[in-house]
Amino acid sequence: MSTTQRLHQGGLLLADWLNAAAPADCGALACFAGTVRNQHEGRAVSGMHYHAYPALAEARLLEIENEAATRFGAYIRVAHAVGELAVGDVSVVVVVHAPHRAEAFSACRWAIDAIKQTIPIWKEERYLDAPSRFLEGQVLKPVKDA
């Protein structure tokens, strides 16, 4: 898998993102990886299917990287999985390199929140004991407002 691909079919491999080259002036690395969990609101989950509007999702993920660079002076890479994922699979990755830890942590937190608020990706949960269902979403914001 290429770390230039922001929207990725199937689960992400965190190691691929952590091993990507970092700018030499960055002394801090912060990352976040979201995984598919085995339960939600008391129901046993067997997996998740992520649906996306690819053109807009790709554009928004790039906007998040650019906005984080401007806001925090950080080098950041983000990616989100689409398609069928099993429990334990990595669905979203945020990797931040920054000169110092404060900027790295802030950029990482901001980026995952921006992904949740601005990317047109919908979660369809698969259950062990019931039909699948789409989780309720939220109104999408522009990246700069995230």
Image (cartoon, rainbow, N blue to C red):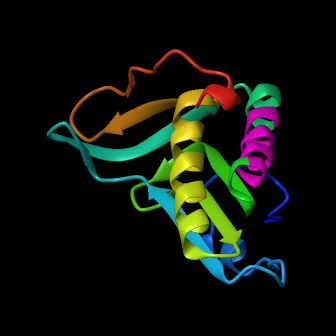
Helix, strand or loop for the magenta stretch, by majority: helix
Residue 65 highlighted magenta (yes or no)? yes
Q: Which residue occupies the foreground of this view, 123 or 19?
A: 19
Question: x, y percentage for residue 77?
Answer: 73, 59
Question: x, y percentage for residue 51?
Answer: 61, 30
For the N terminus, the quadrant is bottom right
Is 130 positioned to the left or the right of 61 in the image?
A: left
Q: Residue furthest left?
A: 42
Q: Which residue occupies the foreground of this view, 137 or 24?
A: 24
Above or below, 111 relative to 49: below
Q: Which residue occupies the foreground of this view, 107 or 20?
A: 107
Magenta range is: 59-70
Q: Quadrant of residue 41?
A: top left
Is 84 positioned to the left or the right of 132 in the image?
A: right
For the C terminus, the quadrant is top right
Above or below, 63 relative to 94: above
Question: x, y percentage for residue 39?
Answer: 24, 47
Is 108 positioned to the left or the right of 47 in the image?
A: right
Residue 36 visible to the viewer = yes
Residue 121 visible to the viewer = no
Residue 60 highlighted magenta (yes or no)? yes
Residue pictured at 26% horizontal, 41% vertical: 128
Residue pictured at 45% horizontal, 21% vertical: 137
Above or below, 62 relative to 31: above
Above or below, 28 relative to 133: below
Residue pictured at 48% horizontal, 32% vertical: 123
Q: Which residue occupies the foreground of this view, 138 or 102?
A: 102
